[in-house]
Amino acid sequence: MIGVEATEKIFVLFKKHYEKYINISQKYEEARNIAYYLEEKYHEVKHFVADVVMLEKILRRVEVGVRHLFARMHFSPLCLLAEKAFAREGMFAEHGYRIHPSPVR
């Protein structure tokens, strides 16, 4: 049989190791929660970046379309009127477009 002192010593060692185990398991849970949080944030940022890239592509396509439209546009009175109206609102000035003088007839 094991003596009382040996039993107390085993109990103390068990308690000491058990407390270490509990401490380590708590730290593991905290680290796991942080990892899950960071993974969620990573996916949020990844989707945000993908959306920004898609919007930049769309913006480039629109800018090319506007340039192509202005290159092909005939300066009819209706087009000139629309361009002047847009220019008053600052829509074309932001992108470097200018109001052309009406054609001489």
Image (cartoon, helix red, strand yellow):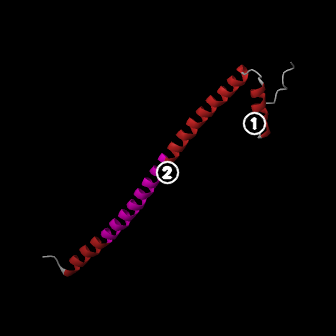
Point out the tag, 1 or 2, that comes first from the N-terminus.
Answer: 2
Q: Is residue 96 visible?
A: no
Residue under pointer 2? 41
Say which residue appears at 58% left-offset and 40% top-offset.
52
Say which residue appears at 78% left-offset and 31% top-offset.
81
* Label disc, if present, on residue 102 of the rendered structure: none
Q: Magenta stretch: give its range.
A: 16-43
**Mark 1 residue type:** Phe
Q: How many marks?
A: 2
**Mark 2 residue type:** Lys
Q: Nearer the viewer, residue 40 or 101?
A: 101
**Quarter of the rendering containing residue 62:** top right
CA neighbours of label 2 inside 10 A, class few (<14), some (14 to 19), many (20+): few
Q: CA distance from mark 1 to mark 2?
A: 41 Å
Q: Nearer the viewer, residue 15 or 58?
A: 58
Residue under pointer 1? 86
Say which residue appears at 42% left-offset and 58% top-offset.
33
Q: Main secondary structure of the magenta part?
A: helix
Q: Quadrant of the C terminus?
A: top right
Query: Percent x, y for residue 36?
Result: 42, 54
Query: Percent x, y for residue 92?
Result: 75, 34
Question: With respect to residue 77, does 4 lie above or below?
Answer: below
Question: With respect to residue 76, does 54 lie above or below?
Answer: below
